[in-house]
Image (cartoon, rainbow, N blue to C red):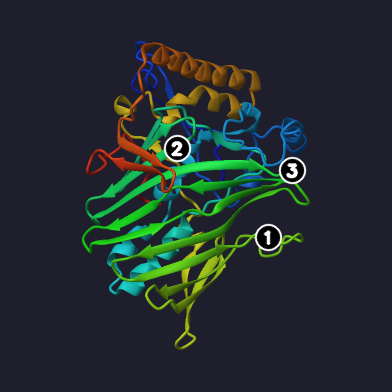
Amino acid sequence: MAFSSLPVAAKANPHPIPMGNRGNVDRTAVLTAPLSFDGESQVDYKAPNLLQRILGLLGNVRPGSDLTNFQLPPIFNIPKSQLQCFGEPLYCTREDMLSRCCSAESPLERLTSVVAWSISITRPLIFGVAPYNPILGETHHVSRGNLNVLLEQVSHHPPVSALHATDDREELEMIWCQHPVPKFYGASVETEVHGKRQLKLLRLGETYVMNSPKLLIRFFPVPGVDWVGNVRITCQGTGLGAELCYRSPSLMGRNRRSIKGKIMDLSSSKTLYEVDGHWDSTVTVKDVSNGKQKVIYNAAEIISGSKTPQVKDSKCVLGSESAVVWSEVSLGILSKDWDRAREAKKAVEEEQRKLKKERDSKGETWVPKHFTVSYDKKNGWDCLPIEKSVPSAPIHVPFDC
């Protein structure tokens, strides 16, 4: 399933946008279908000649430049925020892979399930378009079954997103912090995604710590978007870990979306399983002790046919919700009304500049609502949730997928 050309829209409770405090504004929540492997060919709202437009936009940018604060016109946007793209892999799935992590009997089986789940949160992006950069204080709150997911944009310059997700029935918790740093290299843009990701199996007392691969956008010789680089997953409680390599495709396009790696004993660095496959199809592990192989991940079973989130309780949808903040921009993009999209995006950005100016004039420092945030040069950004668990959301994903 690709992005829906007809958005799911519902009237939301008229709250002010983040930090606005300017009275009630009636907004509509616009929700679009999740990213999918066939989205590139099915999306119908993209403007023509995007490659030429992109190269023209980057014509005056020097190679090696940091693109963090680079502003994209809506013609280069998909109708959803980066917060939504960050959270979707957790709640837009056909099968509950997280429950497998909790129910696996042995530490090795649990780590293998965590590896499979970590691969499942790798989703394809569409060349030539990108999600909106979240505004300061923007939130995204969605539930699927007993899993409740809450995200907040805790910093704008630099952009830092925090995620907290809990499932009280399965007794699991996720705490993530994401700080993307995109750089332009002439023929490509490479984004390093800094920040720690933790998956906690609370009943077992196990914490799995992992990082994210890098996002590579290539302009030449063949335009495309790929996840590349190394991901390391460790669990100090069990002494087991994994190393995965998302491989960059060759000039001829071979090895696209391929992944190789190993599951190992951390104390001895002994390899227990070898990991091999493609994250958009199937991934297998091979037991090095006997050569037996098994499939641990099948993308078609997990991702294909994922449902679009729906507004369950419109009265409780906040004005800070991504689907509300960017609703007018999204409607403009989906209808290819670029003037409408441009004016709506300009209005959102101008409001944020105005609020920042007001805070600066009063000597006020903006404080996140749902997370405590810290930064140091050695460890980077760290985001800790204020509440112990995430409440059920007014937006939910149908559980029959």
Tell me: residue 302, above or below residue 113: above
What is the C-alpha distance between the residues marked 2 and 1?
A: 29 Å
264 lies left or right of 384: right
- At label 1, the amino acid type is Pro
140 relative position to 252: left or right? left
Secondary structure of the residue carrying tag 3 is loop
Residue at point 56%, 59% (across, down): 280
Q: CA distance from mark 3 to mark 1?
A: 18 Å
The amino acid beneath tag 3 is Gly
Looking at the image, tell me whether mark 2 or mark 1 is earlier in sequence order. 2
Which residue is disc 2 drawn over? Answer: 160
Is residue 267 found left or right of 7 in the rendered image?
Answer: left
Q: Which residue is mark 1?
A: 249
Q: Mark 2 near mark 1, Cβ–Cβ under 8 Å?
A: no
Q: Quadrant of residue 78?
A: top right
SS at badge 2: strand
Mark 3 vs 1, N-terminal side: 3
SS at circle 1: loop
Going by the numbered disc 2, the residue's amino acid type is: Val
